[in-house]
Image (cartoon, rainbow, N blue to C red):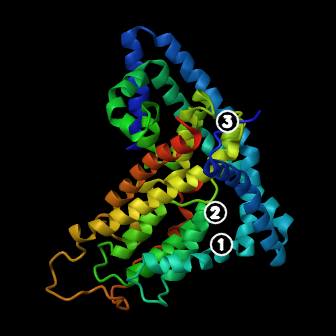
Amino acid sequence: MLNLVWLALVLGGMAFAAVRGDVGRVADAAMSSATTGVDTALGLMGVMCLWLGLMKVAEKSGFVAVLARALTPLGRLLFPGLPKNSPALGPVFMNMGANLLGLGNAATPFGLKAMQELQKLNPHPDTATDEMCSFLVLNTSSITLVAAVVVALRAQAGARQPADIVVPTFLATCCACAVGLTVERLLRRLFPAEGGRRAGGRLREGREGPAGGRGIGGAAGWRGSRGGGPR
Amino acid sequence: MAREQRGRPAVKLVESASAWAIPVLLMAILLHAWVRRVNVYDAFVEGAGEGFWLAVKVMPYLVGMFMALGVFRESGALEVLTRLFRPVLEPLGLKGELMPLMLIRPLSGSAAFGVTAELIRQYGPDSAIGRLAAVMQGSTDTTFYILTFYFGSVGIRRIRHSLLAGLAGDLAGFVASALVCRWFFGG
């Protein structure tokens, strides 16, 4: 999909320029913007070192666990279907805490663990449960306290107050999250988990899973764009 | 260089909260680590070493996106696209120049970061487009990637309404970014 978008941008641009008879300028733009790309990446290196260093400190001191504990009441609200002492709650909160700090790499193992625990409660192992959908919407809207690397990007480009986007970003991401979770709640009934196979009976009342998690926890090492991508 | 003061107390509050966010987080993390007797400096250096590789890792994404957007803009195609989508985007407070970012944000984090970097460079960090790009980049995540990866890890094939909900969240994030930016930074 991304391949298509990229291809459309480049080929579309080239074709458009050819029609307008302005190919030379476009070729120049391609070359010079490639150079700018490298400059930008190099210029960000310092801030990335600083931020990742700080985040390593947070990781080692257990700061994520502190955040996770602070989130517990909120989590209860978001996952009413889970039993109070469910083993899924721990990794869910740790994942949320790590995401708040923008620790993509640390958040993923907790996220995978949370999915495994949720899968154990799942009566239809090939179908997502309501809790899984909530959890993933929480992840895709990614509430982050401080979008540090974006601030660095603005500083590098000479912004007057590079950090002035921090609170606006936080507010916007909260809106994204709230809307995502609301839509998820509203759509649940339109996309029922039970495919009509079993008659009657609510099945998903936190049954200790006969289904069992078919997890591949080792996949934590495989990280795509999310880990590498500073937000 | 003082910003134009618009005198609204809420705006001033948001402004100083933004300025304090990074120092406060930095102090909180370091103090907490100190109390927990972590070897702060050693941990910092260990983490900082990874910063170099992160920058190297995002470089190809930046080059790829800078190049594609450069071509698309210089050819005049972006202008046409912008004019085409103006009736749809304008009521939402969004601008056509941000179309590429909105398309790419749910697909790839690094690529979207490249787009944001390019927009900030091109239009200036304090321009409406530059600011909005920065806020949009920070306000949502790569929906497709997360769903594929997390559901795939436990073998779930029927994802039900999760993709719709995730994309609704993304769209809400974009529109909220535009509204918040307009409220805070002015038109």
Whether residue B115 is situated above or below residue A59 in the rendered picture: above
Q: Quadrant of the N terminus of chain B?
A: top right
The reply to whether discs 2 and 1 touch (Cβ–Cβ < 8 Å) is yes
Local packing at callout 1 (Cα closer than 10 Å; few below 14, some 14-19, many 20+) is many
Residue type at mark 1: give it. Val
The answer to whether residue B14 is visible is yes
The answer to whether residue A225 is visible is no
Q: Which mark is residue A101?
A: 2
Whether residue B61 is situated above or below residue A226 in the rendered picture: above
Residue type at mark 2: give it. Leu
| Inter-mark Cα distance, 2 to 1 | 8 Å
Q: From the viewer's perspective, is A178 left or right of A203?
A: right
Please provide percent x and percent y for residue B35.
83, 77
Residue B48 placement: quadrant: bottom right
Residue A122 placement: quadrant: bottom left
Local packing at callout 2 (Cα closer than 10 Å; few below 14, some 14-19, many 20+) is many
**Residue topped by disc 1:** A64
Q: From the viewer's perspective, is B162 left or right of A217?
A: left
**Residue topped by disc 3:** A40
